[in-house]
Image: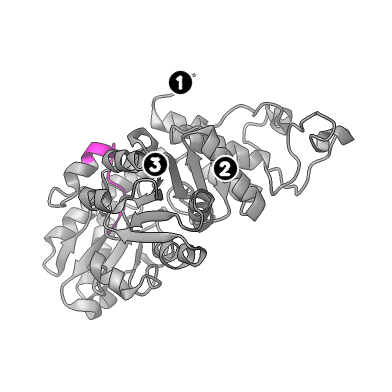
Amino acid sequence: MSLEDKNTKCIHAGEGPAAGSTEAHCMHAHTFPIFQTSTFIFDDAQMGADLFGKKREGHVYGRIGNPTVEKFERAMAELEHGNSGIAFAAGMAAVTGAVFPFLKAGDHAVCSQVMYGPSTHFFGNILTRYGVKTDIIDTADTEKVRATVRKGETKVVYVETPGNPLTTVTDLAEVAKIAHEAGAILIVDNTFASPIFQNPLDEGADIVLHSITKYVNGHGDVVGGVVVSKTPENAAIIRKWRTDTGGIMGPFDAFLVLRGLRTLAMRMERHGANAQKVAEFLEKHPKVERVTYPGLKSSPYHERAAKQMHGGYGATFSFIMKGGFDAAKRVIEHTKLASLAVSLGCLDTLVEHPASMTHASVPRKIMEEQGLCPELIRISVGCEDPKDIIADLEQALSYA
């Protein structure tokens, strides 16, 4: 059955057991169960390996696979229009698991300048330890991407769009063409948009990933990540990497994320509608210098976002205060409804200070180049009544 409506897809994605799976034993359970086990029992000795010419079907060991985790992986593959999902224990485990298997010493990688701080640290400081040459650039500038990617040498182009925290928007279709012409793969972090507002594989990307800690789970009680591959070949490479390095998601976390996934479409609709109203309020406020939300017509990325995003522009963005860091500090310390905390994508509104919190590991030079200034505040707009969110921001802004 082909499901078109996103709410229907979120509720029913991943249904049905995998072939040869233990899941066949629980088909009458309305809510998919938690297989909280570290290992699985063999029927006979020949099921253990290819030694006797009979390949093992089903599950072997929790580090390799688990029915609850695989249910979530199938659901995400459906929502992202991909071939296979591979779930990880954290968003950064998904980042490293999507990138590392495709690189070796001497290769070249290109990544977005505006993206999650630890992702920047991974490309700028971790990969380089292993002999991988990296360029961290503004991937929203398509010509800069074209000038930086090297045919035959660049193996990975990694893009986060909208970018964290300045919500820069990269033209995925054009960057995919550039990457493929050079013999590279395009990997896209789709966390800010979720599969409801953007599907990078449809735009030409090879691999898409999410920190499911954020919108996919949506309830602030799970840390996890997921990678979705367009092809079974790349999926097999990533899954083998996960098996070898051990970063698989736990079954209880997968159960919680499956619960969150069922309401993802309706939550994103509310998140996006609220964010639009909050961004418009902030744009008109006399103490705010600039708002970075791509849903605003004043955004330099509005037309591009409207082209490749659908149904909304996300709900996490930044605004820059007049009055410098002191003004920003006073605002985030005086919100009452909004919590001061890292992360995003929860039902409730969160504010944070990227320069000293989520992006503190980003080198100062890159901070300055991307415009990540001390007076910048990031807000993750929640699902409360928008009037209450705006009223909270209004009273907090009075302290600036």
Residue position for label 3: 183
Q: Position of residue 91 (x, y in %)?
A: 49, 55
Distance Cα–Cα, label 3 vs label 2: 17 Å
- Residue at point 69%, 32% (across, down): 23
Q: Nearer the viewer, residue 395 or 356?
A: 356
Q: Nearer the viewer, mark 1 or mark 2?
A: 2
In the image, residue 279 above or below residue 5? below
Horizontal and vertical percent position of residue 49:
80, 37
Q: Secondary structure at mark 1?
A: loop
Q: Which mark is residue 283?
A: none
Q: What residue lies at 40% left-to-right and 40% top-to-bottom?
A: 195
The magenta span reads: 306-317
Quadrant of the snapshot with the C terminus: bottom left
Residue 320: percent from the left, percent from the top? Answer: 20, 67
Amino acid under disc 2? Ile
Q: Amino acid at mark 3?
A: Gly
Location of residue 178 by image quarter: top left
Total tally of numbered discs in the picture:
3
Q: Nearer the viewer, residue 191 or 350?
A: 191
Residue where numbered disc 1 is placed: 2
Q: Earlier in the sequence, mark 1 or mark 2?
A: 1
Kindly give the residue lying farthest to the top in the view shown: 1
On the image, numbered disc 2 is attached to which residue?
Answer: 237
